[in-house]
Image (cartoon, rainbow, N blue to C red):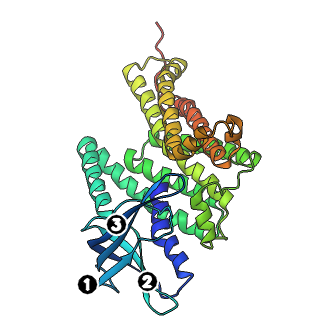
Amino acid sequence: MKKIFLSILLSLCLVPQFVAAESNEMKQFEAKVIDIIEQKEVTDESGYTLIQQDLLLEGLTEPWKGKEIYYNGISDMVVLNMINSAYTVGDRVIMNSFLNQEGENEFFVLDLVRRNYIYLLGIIFAIVVFLVGRKKGLLSLFSLGVTFFIIIKIIIPFIINGYNPLLVALFGSFLITICVMYLTEGVSKKTHIGVLSVFISLSVAFLLSIIFVSLARLSGFSSEEVSLLANAGSSIINFKGLLLAGILIGTLGVLDDAILSQIEAVEQLRTVNPNLSKKELIQSALIIGRTHIGAMVNTLFLAYAGASLPLLILFSLNTELITFGQALDNEFIATEIIRTLTGSIGLCLAVPIATILATYALHIQEKTPV
């Protein structure tokens, strides 16, 4: 979800604010490409090829609805745009218009309109989840909507209004946990155990993240998105707290699955063999849990490595100038490693915590004497 929110923020909020600094007459609208007047490729000093285009467009929304617009995109300046792809006739794009010092309208193409494809993929996703998961899948879709609502309508507004991001994220994470678990699993003893297990595991990850972010003196300004957010005038936000909040919410995403699976494993083992003692039940359930840990920890690493892949490649190309130790000293790399390790520790502890709680809460019948 983080990438979706940042993309919306960058394309629809930050860029217009930068342009608005030059003129108060800036307006954003949508248009359709009706002709490619001219196109050329330019190569920068590093050998990277960029595409520049002069376009003729038709406005689709006010204040330029139905009007022809000329966009001069060919320039002697070689600048790496947010996207570097050639537009084709029929493409819908997001544009800005503003009055220059001569009082004339100037236009800029900001980005491609992608929402229709995202809506289509979302519909396919919902259909697949429903067909495979049936009632449980439908409840999971509803819980996803609740999670999105809590993040957009509670967590983000409170952070923007200057509240401590970490405390907001902590409260929001527990609220998400309660809503999601009780929606998908219903009100039961297993759900109570799951909520308690998440609370304990998340608290451990919470404390570890605070300690090691402080020891490593991470500022929270390692990513380009945060720098843009700061430049947009969001000085009221505590960016170090925002970093910790991101770690907390990211950890929550893997805890729910691991904990619920482990509680279900304990329940099934107890059902199959009610004569198992508590010790035997814990040992058997932990064997299942260790397999889950191995898969989920690797998933966490791959998720963060995938997000950081361009930077990892950059370091790999400069191994003669930057050692492995120096790469670890980079704040962006250090941030992702601490994020991964604290989340992984919380995940690993969640398995025995959920197993023990489930064993003592769900175990009814001890082994009968022979």
Question: Which secondary structure, mark 2?
Answer: strand
Instruction: Give x and y (percent) for residue 327.
Output: 67, 41
Q: Which mark is residue 106?
A: 2
Q: The disc labelled 1 sits on which kind of residue?
A: Gly
Discs 3/1, front = 3
Location of residue 31 with respect to 190 vertically, above or below = below
Q: Which mark is residue 126?
A: none
Discs 1/2, front = 2
Q: Nearer the viewer, residue 320 or 11?
A: 320
Instruction: Give x and y (percent) for residue 241.
Output: 66, 58
Q: Identify the image quadrant of residue 349.
A: top right
Which one is earlier in the sequence, the residue at label 3 or at label 2? Answer: 3
Distance of mark 3 from mark 2, alpha carbons?
19 Å
User: Which residue is pictured at 49% across the width and 55% down the height?
Assistant: 2
Residue that carries the numbered disc 1 in the rendered image: 66
Instruction: Give x and y (percent) for residue 118.
Output: 32, 58
Q: Which mark is residue 39?
A: 3
User: Which residue is pictured at 28% across the width and 64% down the height?
Assistant: 88
Q: The disc labelled 2 sits on which kind of residue?
A: Glu
Crowdedness near tag 3: few (<14), some (14–19) or many (≥20) residues, C-alpha within 10 Å:
some
Which one is earlier in the sequence, the residue at label 3 or at label 1? Answer: 3
Question: Which secondary structure, mark 1?
Answer: loop
Crowdedness near tag 2: few (<14), some (14–19) or many (≥20) residues, C-alpha within 10 Å:
some
Residue projecting furthest to the bottom? 103
